[in-house]
Image (cartoon, grey):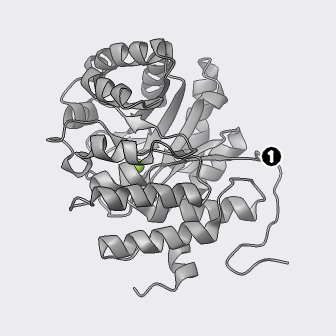
Amino acid sequence: MTAPGLPMTVPAEGLPGRVRIHEVGARDGLQNEKTAVPTEVKAEFVRRLADAGLTTIEATSFVHPRWVPQLADAEQLFPQVAGLPVDLPVLVPNERGLDRALALGARRVAVFASATESFAKANLNRTVDEALAMFEPVVSRAKAEQVHVRGYLSMCFGDPWEGPVPVPQVVRVCRALLDMGCDELSLGDTIGVATPGHVTSLLTALNGEGVPTEALGVHFHDTYGQALANTLAALRHGVTTVDASAGGLGGCPYAKSATGNLATEDLVWMLQGLGIDTGVDLGRLVATSVWMADQLGRPSPSRTVRALSHQEQ
Ligand code: MG
C-alpha cells in the first residue's frame, strides 16, 4: 500500500540506508530573494522545517549586512530558533562573522570558498588562495571552541566565466579546506552544469587524494534538470549528506536560469521511493513550502510541491 501523496517504495541496490539532508532554504534560499523577508516569518519557516523532520537547518549568515541585506537580521533571528532540537549551522565569511555567531552560541559554522579564481574574485574580491588564507583563522578558532565547521566549495563543476572546471583544481581546494580543519565539505554545482559521470569522477579523484567520502556532502542546482540524477550518482558513491532547499528557494545570481537549488521535496520524494530514511514528513514539508510561497507571493518551483499541493501556476 502506498499512502496518498507518497511514492511507492522500491529499494535499489548499492545505496545508503539513510541520508542526512542539509536544509539550506532559510539561508541560501532567502539570501537570493529580492525583498527582505520579516524576521518573524524566517523564524516560523525554520520552526516549520524542524517540525517536518529536518535535523540540519542552515539558519542564516553572519555576513556584513551591506553584502547580503536579506540576512541583516541574523542577530535577531538566531536567538528565536536556537532552542530548537536541531543542528543550526550559520555561514561566517570572516573572523568578525565568527565572533558574532559565537557570541550567540552557534555550535556549527560554515565558510564559503570557491574552486575558481573568477568566482573568488566576484564573490569575495580575493584570489582562491587569499580567500583560503582569510578562512584559516576562522576555522582554527572555531575548532579551538569545538565548533563544527563545514566548508562550502562553489563552482566545483563549471564556472560562468571559465567554463568547465578541471577536477584537480577542485581537489586542491578541497584538500586545503580539510587540512585547515574543516569537518565536512559541501561540493557545490553553483550553476547546475554537472552531469552524473562528472560527479563520480570528482568523488573518485577526492578519494584518491585521501579525502574520505564521509567528509563530503553535495550541493546541486537544478538549472539543467540534473540535480536528482547527480544526487543519485553521489549516493551510489556512498555520499550520505545532501544539501537541498525547501520549495526550491534560491538560485545563483550568476546562473543563466532562475532555477536554482535542488528542492528538498523533490529529493525526499526520490529518497522515499528508494526506501532511504530521511526522517522527513513529506506532507508537512510541502505544507511549509506552500506557506512560504504564500509569504513570498509566488509559487514554489519544486515539481513535487506543485504536484502535491495543486498550486495554481
Ligand atoms: Mg545553492
Residue sitting at 63 percent across and 21 percent down? Answer: 208
Q: Secondary structure at mark 1?
A: loop
In the picture, residue 239 is in which quadrant? top right
Q: Position of residue 275 (x, y in %)?
A: 78, 59
Give the answer, above or below, for where 48 lies relative to 252.
Answer: below
Q: Position of residue 254 (x, y in %)?
A: 26, 50
Relative depth, front residue between 61 and 77: 77
Q: Quadrant of the C terminus?
A: bottom left
Query: Left or right of 143: which side holds 251?
Result: left
Relative depth, front residue between 65 and 200: 65
Residue farthest toward the left in the current orientation of the protein: 66
Q: Quadrant of the N terminus?
A: bottom right
Residue sitting at 28 percent across and 21 percent down? Answer: 95
Residue sitting at 54 percent across and 40 percent down? Answer: 87
Query: Left or right of 92: which side holds 240?
Result: right
What type is the residue that disc 1 sits on? Gly
In the picture, residue 94 is in which quadrant? top left
Query: Left or right of 212: which side holds 301?
Result: left
In the picture, residue 91 is in which quadrant? top left
Give the answer, above or below, for where 25 lies relative to 269.
Answer: above
